[in-house]
Amino acid sequence: MKEKIVKFISDNLINLDDEIEIKDDDNIFEKGFVNSLFSMKLLNYIETEFNMEVDDDDMEISNFSSVNRIEALIKKKTEVLSD
Amino acid sequence: MKESKCIIWDLDNTIWDGVLLEDKNVKLKDNISEIIKEIDKRGILQSIASKNNHEDAIKKLEEFGLDQYFLYPEINWNAKSLSVKNIKENINIGFDTLIFIDDQPFERDEVNSELETVECIDALEYKTLLENPRLNPKFITSDSEKRRKMYMDDIKRKVEEEEYQGPEESFLKTLDMVFKIKPAGSEDLKRALELTERTHQLNSTGVTFSYEELDEFRTSDTHRLYVCELTDKYGSYGKIGLALVELQENVNHMKLLLMSCRVMSRGVGSLLLYHIMNETKQDGKTLTADFLRTDRNKIMYVTYKFANFKEIERSDDGHIVFENDLTFIPPNPEYIKMEL
């Protein structure tokens, strides 16, 4: 799952120099990687790829700020579903 | 009923007398060119749903000097309801803003049975079109006159975008986009009003104001009314954004933020918001914002949340008050130049 997220982020951000590697804990917002178009695409990607809906309560920047946080959000949402 | 944004014409015995397949020398109906041109001037888009040979029909329209007035013409042997659907998808407007005009009751019924909110008009009545209230927009602005041209530019952009290989953002870089933000002038008010009435998806509160109210905000010391325009190498998208901010003692309060759907895929949705955040920070205040959550404005909601706004109030009917302490303001994307 982590690899998928990292791949999506690197494929969709040109701000990202080829030299730069995203670490799992990097805050992608603070590093200036993210703009509004990317945010929408990221959200859309997560919702379709992992078949979940992010509702308003979870739509917090902190849930999307790093690869680890995104993974935690997806796990939380999909585990509740599969119970 | 809503004002119409697009009228879809049949060709045989509607725009011209006769059937093209049977008679190569069909004649335009009396006054039809003038009617089409006048509708165009009013900023109402036009298209075609006709059962004909595509090439022949387009050639005939060129002969008549009318081809450039129609966006996404559907000239084929499909059911007309399907043609209407395709046009609607391509232009990206609601069915309830479409009018379909055809001489054959069968075609009108077919469209109506599939798409009941599309108004169907008998071609016999074409001379009354200009008086039809749905084709008389409350406001005709300089953006309305350019509307067809702006959609035509979009078609060129789409073609180039589809052919482009590589990430979307590097494509955006090739467009040389310039985003202009300025205080609304009196010449912007009609367009501002039109935007509040036409925009639903990228609209924070959906509130509308009268012309006089907007004019008051524009000149008031305690308000800022912004408009923005986007241009790229193909031309202008027109005035596509609007925001109203009320200046209070320690707080700047946003009463409205909206952005035309036409620029949704351009990644410019949050630029006006970031600009207001930056100005408020310079004022040494915090920023609050009214928001009305609807089933259509999720993208706007996400835009606020990802710009670090926090909900401080939420009522059952979806009214939200956002607050932003402005500790983090996202940078503007590199593919776009700002002009203030």
Image (cartoon, coloured by chain):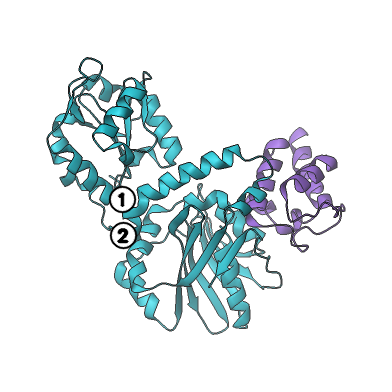
* Nearer to us in this view, B68 or B185: B68
Name the residue that disc number 1 marks.
B43
Chain letter, disc 1 residue: B
Left or right, B107 with reference to B317: left
Label 2 sits on residue = B141
Q: CA distance from mark 1 to mark 2?
A: 8 Å
At label 1, which amino acid type do we have?
Gly
Indicate the quadrant containing the N terminus of chain B: top left, top right, bottom left or bottom right.
top left
Q: Is residue B280 above or below residue A7?
A: below
The kind of secondary structure element at disc 2 is loop
Q: Position of residue A38 (x, y in %)?
A: 67, 51
Could you classify mark 1 by the number of other residues whose Cα lies within 10 Å: few (under 14), some (14-19), or many (20 or more)? many
Q: Please give the name of the residue rendered at 52% of the width and 39% of the height, measured from the top-left corner.
A: B159
Q: Is residue B115 visible?
A: yes
- x then y, percent, for residue B21: 26, 16
Q: Residue at x 18, y 43 (%)?
A: B34
Label 2: chain?
Answer: B
Contact (Cβ within 8 Å) of mark 1 with mark 2 = yes
* Residue type at tag 2: Thr
Q: Colour of chain B?
A: cyan
Task: Give the mark nearest the N terminus, 1 or 2.
Answer: 1
Q: Colour of chain A?
A: purple
x 68%, y 65%: residue: B330
